[in-house]
Image (tube, rainbow, N blue to C red):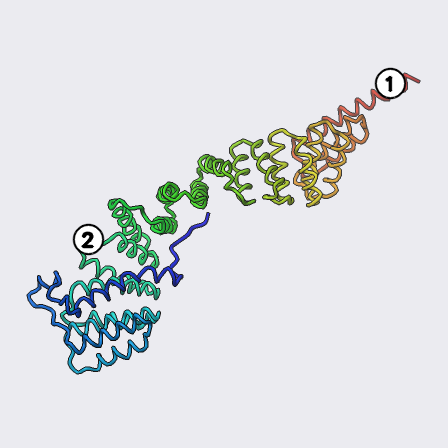
Amino acid sequence: MTIIAIDSSSLKWKKRLIISSVCLALGLGMMVYSPHTPAANDKQSVSKKKKAPLISQKVYKLLTEAQELVANKKYEQALSVLDKIKARSRLNSTERAQLWNFYAYIYFTLENYTKAIQAYETLLKQPELQEGLRTGTLYTLSQLYFLQEDYQSALQKIRQWMELTEEPSPEAYALLGQAYYKLQQYKKAIPAIRKAIELRKLSGRKVKESWYLLMRASYYELKDFNNMEKVVKELTTLYPKPQYFRDLMGIYSQMGKNRKQLALMEVLYERNELNKGSQIRNLASLYLIQGVPYKAAKVLDKAMESGILEKNQKNLELLSQAWLQAREDQRAIASLAEAAKMSGKGDLWIRLGQAHANLEQWNRAIQALKQGLEAGGLKRPDSALILLGMGYYNLDQLDKAKQSFAKAAQQSAATPQNKKTAKQWIKYLDSEIQRAKALKSKDK
């Protein structure tokens, strides 16, 4: 399972994150020095005992000039105009606020985020700063710090903003959760993201996919697979992408819920959404675990024929195992023979011999068993020798059968049961050999 956290490394994503807030903050500033909309008409300003001072005609003219230069993307010239304003000996609080707000916006547009942050921090230090501009600046700063991967500062600013805001937006809670996540404070990240999701639902709008991903990633870091399952289930409902169904399968695997994992994989298989060899192997393995070997063999066989699953030793071995467990020995033989030739492993030749023996194909069984014994590396060579002896017996080659059973009995690693079986066969074969000799001599 692939776990996907929110990636803040993308500049494009980061710019989208804060551009609206930056423009809003600047827009509020421009309203202050508009000759048609003085600061005294602002709703927040009306409620204050002390009104914000008006912008002088000279400063207003310079700000308008800078604004026109920005509109024409002449940012360096606009900064020169702002420098002229800054050089003036007397600036009131409103003028200083608009000056630094404008500096910040231009630096942001130039992607000079360090200077943009410095300008906004300077703006916050201005006395008699309008409350609306203060809150907007705090929110924008939190995003800019996030952009610079200074998550501790981002967290500090967003929390300050929340203290000044009666009803923080879902996006603000999401940003708070993101900051906690980046600081690896996963237990604090989860309530913030949950609040963002809750508020978003209450507004009647669809919850952002990225918020669920952040919640999922936080639960994953805490190894809380029960809650992670709930989040991914909701993701599959709102954003039914194959990846999330695969993630859910991974969660079931982690939790040992093999039946649920298999049921989900079957659905994806029927929808042709399992298109990787590893996924097909996982499905086949689950079928085997759940005691459905025939289905395991069928999906493996089909995947190999279509080319999704490579016909290598590992996969052919799994296919043969599935056919054998399904008691489809004839079908198992082809894959077993290929796997044995590829690997040269003795145990695969022995399995091939067993499959032939099950079908009473004794000559082929003997040939495969002999190759397996010659290849070596067997855990139970005595069992292979007993099977070989049975093969010779069924071909009426009693002396060779006796030799195989004798070797089985002599094996140092032979199990007590195999030794007993081998000796019983030897005793029986001795009587059969004597009987055959007696009949032969009687015929003479």
* Near-viewer residue (48 or 3): 48
* Near-viewer residue (85 or 222): 85
Q: Amino acid at mark 1?
A: Leu
* Near-viewer residue (218 or 343): 218
Extreme residue in the top direction: 442
Name the front one of labels 2 and 1: 2
Q: Is residue 133 left or right of residue 185?
A: left
When the figure is inspected, residue 135 is found, relative to residue 297, above or below; the finding is below
Q: Is the residue marked by circle 1 packed among few (<14), some (14-19), or many (20+) residues within 10 Å? A: few
Q: Is residue 252 left or right of residue 88?
A: right
Disc 2 on helix, strand or loop?
loop
Give residue 429's position: percent from left, percent from top. 78, 25
The quadrant in which the C terminus is found is: top right
Q: Is residue 238 left or right of residue 158?
A: right
Residue 222 in sight here: no
Residue 317 has which mark? none
- Which residue is depicted at the point 15% across and 73% down? 55
Give residue 41's position: percent from left, percent from top. 11, 64
Instruction: Quote the CA–CA distance across marks 2 and 1.
Output: 106 Å
- Which residue is depicted at the point 57% across and 36% down? 299
- Which residue is depicted at the point 51% across and 42% down? 274
Residue 354 in sight here: yes
- Which residue is depicted at the point 35% across and 64% down? 149
Kindly indicate the quadrant of the structure image that contains residue 40: bottom left
When the figure is inspected, residue 293 is found, relative to residue 207, above or below; the finding is above
- Residue beneath disc 2: 167
Disc 1 on helix, strand or loop?
helix
First along the sequence among labels 2 and 1: 2
- How many callouts does the rendering have? 2
Give residue 264's position: percent from left, percent from top. 46, 37
- Residue beneath disc 1: 439
Give residue 68's position: percent from left, percent from top. 27, 72
